[in-house]
Image (cartoon, helix red, strand yellow):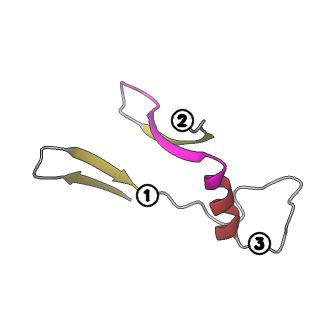
Amino acid sequence: KITPIYDTKGTFNVEVIIEIMEGVVKRIGDENPQETPQQKVKKLVARGLKAQLESESMVTGKLYVRLDFFLMRN
């Protein structure tokens, strides 16, 4: 889901919501197979997992969502 957001201060943002289907992403050596997918995602986010919208092609304007672990800066 993509939602453009414009506020009265002149700021323009685009909210992008993605859904990762259960079973699509696999983890090798799962420490706790009893955890729910939501609990696993919360742990990954706590470790620095972030999503960024990136440009795949300047010609077509095609975008993709990049998932990666980004370093936390203090």
Q: Of tags 2 and 1, which is closer to the observer?
A: 2
Q: Of tags 1 and 3, which is closer to the observer?
A: 3
Q: What residue lies at 62% left-to-right and 64% top-to-bottom?
A: 21
Depth check, front residue: 60 or 23 = 23
Magenta region, residue range: 45-59
Image-quadrant location for residue 3: bottom left
Image x and y of residue 12, in percent: 21, 44
Element class at badge 3: loop
Give the residue type that dot 3 points to: Glu
Q: Quadrant of the N terminus?
A: bottom left
Q: Of tags 3 and 2, which is closer to the observer?
A: 2
Check disc 1: other Cα within 10 Å, few if <14, some if 14-19, many if 20+. Answer: few
Depth check, front residue: 58 or 29 = 29
Judge from the rendering whether residue 35 lies leftward or rightward of residue 52; answer left or right.
right
Q: Label 3, on which residue?
A: 35
Q: Label 1, on which residue?
A: 17
Image-quadrant location for residue 38: bottom right
Q: Which mark is residue 69?
A: none
Whole-Å distance between the Cαs marked 3 and 2? 29 Å
Give the residue type that dot 2 points to: Arg
> Is 52 included in the stretch rendered in magenta?
yes
Q: Label 2, on which residue?
A: 73
Furthest toward the front, the residue is: 74
Judge from the rendering whether residue 29 lies leftward or rightward of residue 74; answer left or right.
right
Give the residue type that dot 1 points to: Ile
Judge from the rendering whether residue 5 lies leftward or rightward of residue 30; answer left or right.
left
